[in-house]
Image (cartoon, helix red, strand yellow):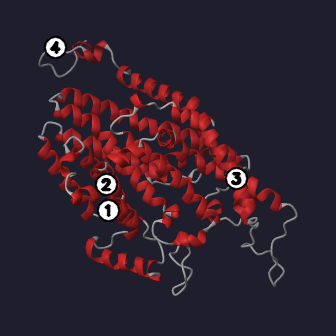
Amino acid sequence: MAIVDQATKQSAPHIRPSSWADGLRGIAAIFVVASHTCLSFATYLIPPSFAETGNSILFQRPFFRLVIQGQAWVAIFLVLLGFVNALKPLQLARRGATADALAALSTGAFRRKWRLVFPAALMTILAWLVCQLGGFQLGRRVDAYWLRATSPKRSTSLSAAVVDLIREIAGTWMWGENAYDQPQWALLSLFRGSLYVFMTLLALVNTTPRFRLCAQMVLYTYSWATLDGTVGTNIFAGMILAELSFYNLTVLQPSAVFRLLPYGLVTLGLYVCSYPDQYADQTEWSSQLASLAETIFPKDANVSRYYASLGAQMICFGVMLSPLMRRMLSHPVLLWFGSISFPLYLIHGPLMRSVLVYLVYLPMSIGFQPTVKADGTLDPESYIPTPGSFRLGVILTIFFAFLLYVVQQWTNHIEPKMGALTAAFENFSRSWGKSTAWSSKEKDEILPITSVRELNM
């Protein structure tokens, strides 16, 4: 009931024309959590069938297998990032308010970076602390692939722990890896995507909308051809959507073909997003997509990521063309999920590797004896077994309710502090080093007056 009450607070006057992007972002965050859950407890869903000639169950088939296709939902995050970040500067530029557009672009670029960096660093510190206290140790012994693979080891000493923390915080933004919170790999892509938006609009803010749209299409094509299928194509697709959103596309709707086009695009997008990351040759539908990839994708492209990006772009474009789908995605419940999407993305991993692991596996670990090999040694591959489906389902239901509660508390109490920290850092950036010696200059003088006088003395 609390969740519903929070969601219904988003009344009609607060719904913006771009609110559908918030609703779609909320759905994407939910499916990212679902994918990690499936990678933990239902790894048989990874291939599209049980064997090369075997049968497929429902959630291995197209559309339904999106529950395990995490990279497709990350691609949607990136398209929406390009769309939302470009909207306000483009709106101001189209009105001729170039100075205001540049100011909005500069301020937005600065703030959004730190609204990513500060919460991510805080979550890494908290996960690091849990790790050093042994909170992830049980997760390293369980029969749940994703939980086991992403549960980090404790450091060997306090000094090593401090070095590990610094390395992982920096690694998030340098090479897209974070042992303490594995899903943070996507933050580097989001960071790069924000820079793409900033640099592109900085160069094109004074151009006409038609030229800007053509330039964005050229940049999209360049990204496609140069194997930047994860960040570049999605960001520029989002910027193209933002540019097109200022055109009256409703003139296309009287035609029956164009009325069906949005639904066809969304359906096709969901279909290609279903392309499996592995074992695509096991089923006819995935084999057909693999063959098509040889024609439409550049050589050496990561086929699964290209299909995830292409499908995400189709979905977002189809939604933008459909007033009905935009209204559906602007439902208050989906807007609430959109408002907590980033905290949900940050928090779910550490909580799954700690709280969920203990709820599921602690009773199973009592009295558990690892398998002994023929030579009398313990089998290192002997993991604590997963309980039955009914019990697991009940525990997951309880855990996800707890997860949403924690995320809401983070949103209410931590996010405002992150915003205040960002604002304080922004004020610091504008005032640090601002002194008479460096700000007072006579016309045509290269050095400040005070500095020249001091040098003459």
| Location of mark 4 (residue) | 442
Amino acid at circle 4: Glu
Contact between marks 3 and 1 (CB within 8 A): the answer is no
Q: Quadrant of the C terminus?
A: top left
For label 3, the residue is 356
Q: Secondary structure at mark 4?
A: loop
- Residues at marks 3 and 4 touching, judged by CB atoms closer than 8 Å: no
Tell me if residue 127 can be seen.
yes
Amino acid type at mark 2: Gly
Q: Position of residue 365 (x, y in %)?
A: 82, 61
Query: What residue would you read off at disc 2?
Result: 318
- 180 relative position to 396: left or right: left
**Position above or below: 366 against 132:** below
Crowding at mark 3 (Cα within 10 Å: few <14, some 14-19, many 20+): many
Amino acid at circle 3:
Leu
Q: Residues within 10 Å of mark 2 (few under 14, many from 20)?
A: many
Q: Earlier in the sequence, mark 2 or mark 1?
A: 1
What is the CA distance from the residue labelled 3 to the residue labelled 4?
65 Å
Question: For the residue labelled by badge 2, is the local secondary structure a helix, a strand or a loop?
Answer: helix
